[in-house]
Image (tube, rainbow, N blue to C red):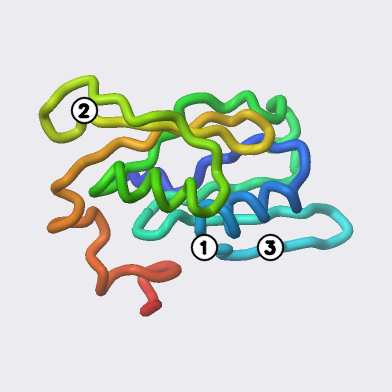
Amino acid sequence: MDWTLEVVVLPVGDIDRSVAFYRDKLGFHLDHDTTNEHMHVVQLTPTGSGCSIVIGDLPSHTEMAPGSMRGLQLVVADATAARQELLDRGVEVSDITVFDERDGGTFFGFADPDGNTWAVQQIKARAEKPLIPLEARGRFGEDG
């Protein structure tokens, strides 16, 4: 039995501002933005990830204080290129820190507009062998 982590609820104070940050500045894919008389829920997924973030105004979102999530982690094949991409998109990021010369020991970080913090780890092996092969990407395994 596989047990896959596919969604993380992220507490934010302003849904539209957060969508603009994650979609427009970070480049996450907007999977859905659902609004009705009961809720406003948005799901966004980083390119190549099997796990999405969900923001919204349901109790599971509002029971946590906006900005209270710490240490969410993204993995990239090239930290220098990823950091520069975020800088070019106007994201304030930390300097790169090398904790260990072995693959996986290089990091930088950033925070979203609410203060939720993210670490970005470099694992060079992801360039040649991504966790989700290119042919399997897309929403629920669909092409795209």
In the displayed structure image, the side of residue 82 where residue 77 appears, left or right:
left
Q: Residue 142: horizontal and vertical position, in percent?
A: 39, 76
* Circles 3, 2 touching at the beta carbon (< 8 Å): no
Specify the quadrant that holds the C terminus.
bottom left
Figure check: 144 above or below 117: below
In the displayed structure image, the side of residue 124 where residue 93 appears, left or right:
right
Label 3 secondary element:
strand
Instruction: Tell me the crowding category of disc 1: few under 14, some 14 to 19, or many 20 or more residues within 10 angstroms, Cα based.
Output: some
Q: Residue 39: horizontal and vertical position, in percent?
A: 80, 53
The residue to which callout 1 is attached is: 29
* Foreground disc of the pair 1, 2: 2
Q: Quadrant of residue 47?
A: bottom left
The residue to which callout 2 is attached is: 105
Query: Residue 33's mark?
Result: 3
Figure check: 82 above or below 64: below
Q: Residue 55: horizontal and vertical position, in percent?
A: 66, 46
Residue furthest to the top in view is: 99
Mark 2 is on which residue type? Gly
Label 2 secondary element:
loop
Figure check: 120 above or below 29: above
